[in-house]
Image (tube, rainbow, N blue to C red):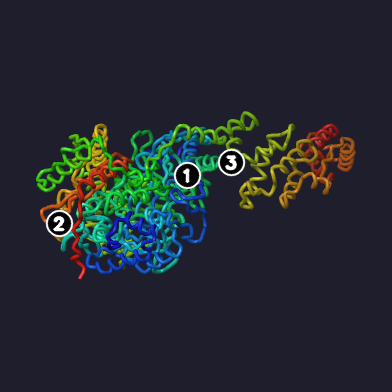
Amino acid sequence: MTKDNSEYLIERRDNVYEVVIGLEVHAQVTSNSKLFSSSSTTFGAEPNTQVSLVDAAFPGMLPVINEYCVKQAIKTGIGLRAQINKRSVFDRKNYFYADLPQGYQISQFKYPIVGEGTVVLDMAHGQKEVGIERLHLEQDAGKSIHDMDPQNTLVDLNRSGVALMEIVSKPDMRTPDEVSAYVKKLRSIMRYLGTCDGNMQEGSLRADVNISVRIKGSDKLGTRCEIKNVNSIKFMQMAIDYEANRQVDLIEEDKTIDQETRLFDTKKNETRSMRSKEDAHDYRYFPDPDLLPLEVTDEFIEKLKADIPELPDDKKKRFIDEFKVSAYEATILVSDIDTAKYFEEVVAKMGKNRDMKLAVNWITGELFAVLNNKNLEITQSPISAKNLAKLINLIKNGTISGKIAKTIFELMIDGDIDPQIIVEKKGLKQESDPKALEALIDKIINDNREKAIEYKNGKEKLFGFFVGQAMKASSGKANPQLINEILKKKLQ
Amino acid sequence: MSDITSLTLTELVKNIKDKKISSEETTKAFIDRGEKSRDLNAYITEDFSNALLKAKSFDQKPNFDLKLPGVPMAVKDLFCTKDVKTTAGSKILNNFIPPYESTVTQNIWDVGAILLGKLNCDEFAMGSSNETSFFGNVQSPIDKGLVPGGSSGGSASALAANLTPITIGTDTGGSIRQPASFTGTVGLKPTYGSCSRYGIVAFASSLDQAGPMSKDVKDCALLQEIISTYDEKDSTSIDFKRNEYSKELTNNIKGKKIGVPKEYRVDRMPKEIEDLWTKGIEYAKDCGAEIIEISLPHTNYALPTYYIVAPAEASSNLARYDGVKYGFRSKGENLIDMYEKTRSEGFGSEVQRRIMIGTYVLSSGYYDAYYLKAQKVRKLIKNDFEEAYKKVDAILTPSTPSAAFKIGEKTNDPVSMYLNDIFTVPVNLAGLPAISIPAGVDVKGYPLGLQIIGKAFDEQNILNIAYAMEEKIQFRNKITDWWIK
């Protein structure tokens, strides 16, 4: 099905279809209090303990905009290189549901706070731009719990009124990999900005996926289906794969695709119709008369701009220029703000005689493996940047070999121990004295005379055998480079 | 001294400050009269025993520096009052006890006043005769079988009948001014944004405004300066310089330019209303004001515009009454069924009618033709006033197109009921302040009011004009206490 990484095409008979994907990402704004009330937003609190009279829609209660959330949305807009709208309007989206206390959600319909922007994806085959249609602020609903009581549905309003940013992309994505890269990039940008923690398990980031298919080469969009509320990248990819094939099959069977909202069943790995266009809610949007239009000045926006940290794209460029790492390496290092921070700290601690190659390899290799194994974030890394830098410097200045370094690394994990101390305590310092090594090699050649003759007669594979013997004899501490040089000389 | 309950607020405050009467005596007097006047059905909730306790405690440690020292008063049941049932005249809030206080009532208690109880009103303030209340219609003290107007009908009736020395209402399309006009009392709808809407059960957010209802203009000015505060809890509250209206009150309005809009001479206007208006113009002239004919060309569209905007907002504002969180709930087979039963049983027919109108005008396909167009017309109406205020300082009109009518007379004809608001709704649409003062009577002797409309934030000016005219008019309400056996 997949021809190469840059394409995701579905073939049936003589037809080749491409998939057109757009995303509506709901990102919870990082903020201590809700969008229109002062209730706390801490995740995981006891049900209905973070609910104000406003959140529970008591009579006569009025929303008051949280300025911090507005700043967060504007910052995100800046991070998406988007138009910031100096005037935006909050609308009411009217519908009844038990976990929607007001009977409407306050959202932005006609005039969002952020307009068009761009996100750049670093794909294996090159860069890809995805357009941003808009970003608007809205309230989250509460949570209906259907499985705690056999008779009743229970409602938890802790989430009711929490600020969300809905980020709508243009239908610019064509493959599940691009969707994955897009979500990761959005997450990365927002984490850099501190505007959304991007925690998908806690529901801080979830997406509605819009999918349509068309014959490759066509410039007309097909009928789209919207898959609601997918909360992991893996599920997004699975849902796209299922849904795109479902749509292609319908076309191939000359059936029509209904524009509808669908749900992704993660257990059965299929999408199911939730409601058709005819059943779609009439939300009766209208400007919320309890709130004035949101107006911000150029000065307000400029002040926020001045606060924007270096974002992944700029950081990547700088890493390439300043640290001479490859584009690929830079992409990995900047993808998460904490990884980038860790890397820069290692670089700083390595000092003048730094070795970027080693630093990158050790972070993306050994360290990532340990974090992965222990299911830790880099901020919880068992080895501090300082000590990793020391370890790298020990390799760089020849004190230890790369192989010994791996042993030391394992020992460092338990308690973030200074590698220098391990080297001294365990006597792991590399043997780099040419005279001592020469004596050691002389003895090995002497002990293996036949093999030395065989080697001289052309059996070059035996060189490895001598290296191995030398390392063994030195308990791995011999400087491998010197061993090679001396062996070559002696076996001539 | 004359009967305590017939004193104006200003007189009452003076008597209390002069220690001629205590808060307890005062409170008792109003409670006694309230108990004798239950046939008026002005109260939904009496909080008499608490009021008495508060009055006693005030007397033990009186603070006469307060503006309303130990003064008891009843308020419209649209204001949420902490720990006192607040129903908005609806079955759906029949059992609702707010754990919070509205800003406006808090402002009143903060200056020493004491809550007597909660006054009847049209359900969710939707009505012009106080006949839509779940708690029954209110009788006007003016005459048996007469409506007191609405929606602040309980407030107007209680005030005119001396059950409270002063009161507050809310005015979305005329709900303070029309009942004031019907009961021979004074009612002020302040500029939108003057009084906080926090804690007031919402009807139509962009129009709702709380305001004072009083026996005379001076009292009105005093209460207005108490209730009008900037409030961060209401995003539409406006931070402007508020006067000490009662202190700055003057009857010197010489040279004030008062506009008379020709469009308010509506077809089939009763002669007595026209005469009242003419008389009003003469009074204004007598006070030294200059009368200028003006035009408010979009007046005709105000009523239909209002009956799109107000129901639209109401349909959304009332969505929260769904039986889930508080208030009345009916049992249902499932969630939708519960909603339907709760709302069909919990809301009265006028409220349901307006929810349906509002839902309709916001529906996709109709939004542009109704709601959006209404918003555009609303802007035109606002512009009309802005244009007029380039030439005049205030505008004089009748408050209502007729005097009070009989209970039941218009209940089956909503349009004729809605027409009651014809002179008052343009003011709400434009967000302006307006005061109704009693100015005469119709052939049956029922009170008629004149409305003075001001520029935004210019409450002082219309209070001054009203104050000056009040002196000339010398209106006396004839209340016979017919309901007291």
Note whether B127 is above or below A150 in the view shown: above
Tell me, yes or no, whether dots 1 and 2 are on the same chain.
no
Q: Which is nearer the eye, A255 or A338? A: A338
Give the image quarter of residue A9. top left
Q: Nearer the viewer, mark 3 or mark 1?
A: 1
**Number of numbered discs visible in the structure rendering:** 3
Q: Which residue is mark 1?
A: A69
Q: Residues within 10 Å of mark 2 (few under 14, many from 20)?
A: some
**Which residue type carries mark 1?**
Cys
Point 28% across, 54% down: residue: B214
Quarter of the image where the N terminus of chain B is located: bottom left
Residue A403 image point, x, y percent: 75, 43
* Whole-number angstrom distance, CA of label 3 to CA of label 1: 21 Å
Residue A486 image point, x, y percent: 84, 34
Q: Is residue A225 visible?
A: no
Q: Which residue is mark 2?
A: B405
* Whole-number angstrom distance, CA of label 1 to CA of label 2: 52 Å
Q: Is disc 1 placed on a helix, strand or loop? A: helix
Of all chains, the one bearing label 3 is A
Give the image quarter of residue A454. top right
Q: Which mark is residue A337?
A: 3
Residue B462 image point, x, y percent: 28, 42
Q: Is disc 3 placed on a helix, strand or loop? A: helix
**Which residue type carries mark 2?**
Phe
**Which residue type carries mark 3?**
Ile
